[in-house]
Image (cartoon, rainbow, N blue to C red):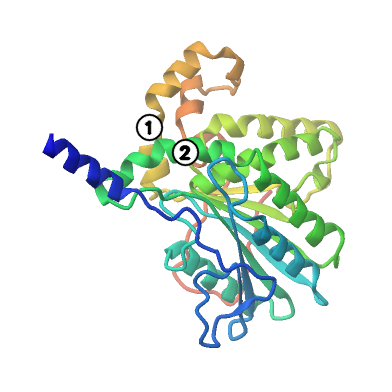
């Protein structure tokens, strides 16, 4: 009995107690290099590196932990006298909005680099936090993939989508036409983004204007933990529009970038989907998608970035750096 009680205490202590982190909420941003502690601030300005970082956090049902976070970010976006470069970022598994999280640190570095390349823009990053990490004990953390994956699929059904559309309205419709809006989802965060935006894309594509279907300027999914089947409907709709309206060459609706070395989406994802994919491919004909040369199991078990039938390009590092950073693409 004592051993069982001891084991239960260990499991309970492993659960990450804090659900959201940006509790110091204000429309007045915290100055990052003025000696202030900005670790709990929902708005952070870094004058030295020239960017503002806002945080909006969501619970497991896609609802705001505190809607004042969202209101503060939207108010900051509306209060601008110069073109804005806005980056929305959604993290994946094992991450959250804690200031020490390496995704938060790397996002700050990315915003600094964007400002260096775009000095005339007001650079604003918006970090969309959710409970990608629920357990702190290392040997238990790996067991949370299935529960976090399930959460990522339903997150986009509620206030996350409302917030994304509000940001798009402010940045792309009601403001300076030079404004830029880049949206990035990583790993299970890409699942959140695809789940939220796919119905919007499909709705816009039904109007037959592929050049106006984009959300913002571009959506980038990095190493998405998303099965190929979930992307198939959007791909088919894009092909239908291209076949009927023959649009002029435009920027892409979405880019999926997957690393060949990412074993989480290349191997672990397939292992975790192997049995469910078999049942879905056999017992769920409603969800089946017809892709020539691909089995239903492949579509349900393979991450979209590693599905051979969807791969269109390959990016490789050059041996030497070039002064010309332009990328030429053979259509």
Q: Which residue shows up at 85% across the image and 68% down it?
A: 176
Q: Nearer the viewer, residue 42 or 185?
A: 42
Residue 303 seen anywhere in this rendered image of the structure = no
- Which of the image's four quarters has the N terminus? top left
Q: Nearer the viewer, mark 1 or mark 2?
A: 2
Mark 1 to mark 2 CA distance (whole Å): 10 Å
Q: Tell me, for residue 149, which label it has, or none.
A: 2
Image spot of residue 268 (x, y percent): 36, 38
Identify the residue at the far left of this view.
2
Contact? badges 1 and 2 (CB < 8 Å): yes
* Above or below, 265 relative to 287: below
Q: Quadrant of residue 325?
A: bottom right
The front one of 202 and 307 is 202
Name the residue located 72 percent from the left edge and 47 percent from the top edge. Answer: 162
Q: Secondary structure at mark 2?
A: helix
Mark 2, Cα crowd under 10 Å, few <14 / some 14-19 / many 20+, is many
Q: Secondary structure at mark 1?
A: helix
In-image side of 1 versus 191 (left or right): left
Q: Quadrant of residue 183?
A: bottom right
Left/right placement of residue 236 relative to residue 262 reads right
Q: Residues within 10 Å of mark 1 (few under 14, many from 20)?
A: few
Q: Nearer the viewer, residue 11 or 231?
A: 11
Image coordinates of residue 221 in percent, x first then y, are 57, 49
Residue beneath disc 1: 272
Residue 145's label in the rendered image is none
């Amino acid at each position: 009995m004592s051993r069982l009680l001891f084991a239960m205490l260990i499991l309970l202590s492993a659960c990450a107690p804090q659900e959201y982190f940006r509790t110091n909420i204000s429309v007045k941003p915290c100055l990052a290099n003025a000696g202030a502690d900005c670790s709990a601030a929902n708005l952070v300005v870094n004058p030295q590196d020239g960017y503002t970082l806002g945080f909006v956090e969501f619970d497991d049902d896609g609802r705001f932990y505190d809607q004042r976070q969202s209101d503060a970010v939207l108010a900051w976006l509306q209060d601008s006298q110069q073109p804005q470069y806005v980056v929305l970022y959604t993290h994946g598994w094992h991450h959250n909005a804690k200031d020490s999280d390496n995704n938060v640190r790397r996002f700050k570095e990315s915003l600094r680099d964007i400002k260096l390349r775009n000095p005339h823009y007001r650079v604003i990053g918006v970090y969309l936090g959710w409970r990608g990490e629920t357990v702190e004990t290392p040997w238990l953390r790996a067991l949370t993939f299935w529960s976090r994956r399930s959460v990522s699929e339903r997150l986009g059904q509620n206030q996350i989508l409302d917030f994304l559309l509000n940001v798009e309205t402010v940045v792309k419709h009601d403001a300076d036409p030079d404004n830029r809006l880049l949206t990035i989802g990583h790993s299970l965060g890409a699942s959140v983004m695809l789940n939220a935006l796919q119905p919007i894309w499909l709705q816009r594509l039904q109007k037959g204007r592929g050049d106006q279907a984009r959300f913002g300027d571009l959506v980038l999914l990095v190493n998405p933990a998303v099965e190929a089947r979930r992307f198939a409907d959007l791909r088919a709709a894009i092909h239908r529009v291209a076949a009927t309206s023959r649009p002029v060459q435009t920027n892409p609706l979405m880019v999926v970038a997957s690393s060949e070395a990412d074993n989480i989406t290349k191997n672990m994802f397939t292992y975790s989907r192997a049995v469910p994919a078999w049942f879905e491919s056999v017992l769920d004909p409603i969800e089946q998608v017809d892709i020539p040369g691909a089995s239903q199991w492949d579509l349900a078990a393979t991450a979209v970035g590693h599905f051979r039938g969807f791969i269109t390009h390959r990016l490789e590092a050059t041996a030497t750096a070039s002064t010309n950073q332009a990328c030429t693409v053979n259509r």
